[in-house]
Amino acid sequence: MKPIFALLILSTICHSQVQTPDWVLEGTAPWQARDSQAEWVFKDQLWIGGGWFQSYAEPPRDVWASGDGKAWKLVEKNAPWLHSDLPMNITFADKMWIMGGWYKGRLPGHSASNQVWSSGEGIAWNQVTAAAGWTPRLAAGLVEHRGRLWLLGGTEDYYFGTETSLKNDVWSSADGREWKLETAEASWSPRGYHQAVALNDKIYVFGGGNYVPSYHAKNDVWSSSDGVKWTCETEAAPWSPRLWFSAVVYRGRMWVLGGWSKDKDNFGDVWHSADGKNWQRLETKTCWKARHEHSVFVFQDKLWVAGGHARPLSSEVWSLTLPTDWKP
């Protein structure tokens, strides 16, 4: 091989290595390791609140914030919301919102919630409504679409429910207080532990299923522009059927990260799609340990993963930066 060609090949290889995205461990946060917490990006900070430590204790109600993923500040030790295990959360109308969720695990007095709370600074929380129009539930989808909140599906019971506990109703609200039933039965099957995102003027619902007593998991993807009429983009995405995964929109694509299934346990994979039909796996040299019910953020043009159940529970914080010229 002539020297000039060897140099060109070496240069190409080096350039490719530099441009390959990779996960970076930012550190271990000071908050107690957990999963199933609420998460927000708000006022140029990462936030987490509540979550799950174990099934025979009340869930935590602490709220933490960080401007860089490394240094975290305890903002509130005991927020007024109780149902902080698998709640629905979102940043909307310049506030952090938390709603629904589960309380007391397997202990007597356990319950789901249809309360809605919001905060403009993380310390004082306002109860927007003590009983939203939708039934008490946890693990539903929640997105902002066309200037409204949209709540999709979920389950009314965590450890003690039946198939009838699962929902496929769709509700929307302009203010978190008054909710409109858009459809009582969407085309996708009743489910909890799924994810929903809003992308390109559509709502996408994917994955999820049921945990106990009758386990099942899905990897279908559905889309809708109005929350009423739904299109099945695929009955089986290339990522395995799963519960308890995370999803966000980043760089004009929807992303699926991690999760859990009964037959394969935790997942540590990362997938992305622009349309819900065609999916690609993101391969990296370094990645966080397989986990479920972790927080995922889009912040400072990076993907972030925090906490989750990685056997054991984790308080690690990871980030990934895609090169500016990255193309799938």
Image (cartoon, rainbow, N blue to C red):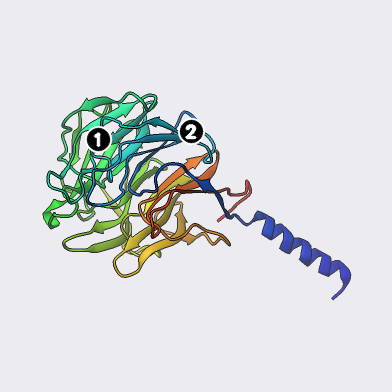
Residue that mark 1 sits on = 172
Q: Is residue 2 visible?
A: yes
Q: Residue 45 carries which label?
A: 2
Amino acid identity at mark 1: Ser
Quarter of the image containing the C terminus? bottom right
Q: Is residue 234 left or right of residue 57?
A: right
Residue 201: image quadrant is top left
* Percent coordinates x, y for residue 69 in the rendering: 52, 40
Q: Which of marks 1 and 2 is nearer the N terminus?
A: 2
> Callout 1: helix, strand or loop?
strand
The residue nearer to you, when weighing 149 against 210, is 210
Q: Which quadrant of the rendered structure holds the N terminus? A: bottom right
Are the residues tagged 1 and 2 within 8 Å (C-beta)? Answer: no
Q: Which mark lies nearer to you, 1 or 2?
A: 2
Residue 183, position in %: x, y? Answer: 18, 42
For image coordinates 17% across by 29% down, the residue present is: 130
Q: Is residue 228 visible?
A: no
Residue sitting at x 46%, y 51%: 274
At a point 14% along the width and 40% down the height, the residue shown is 135
Q: Is residue 283 above or below residue 314?
A: below
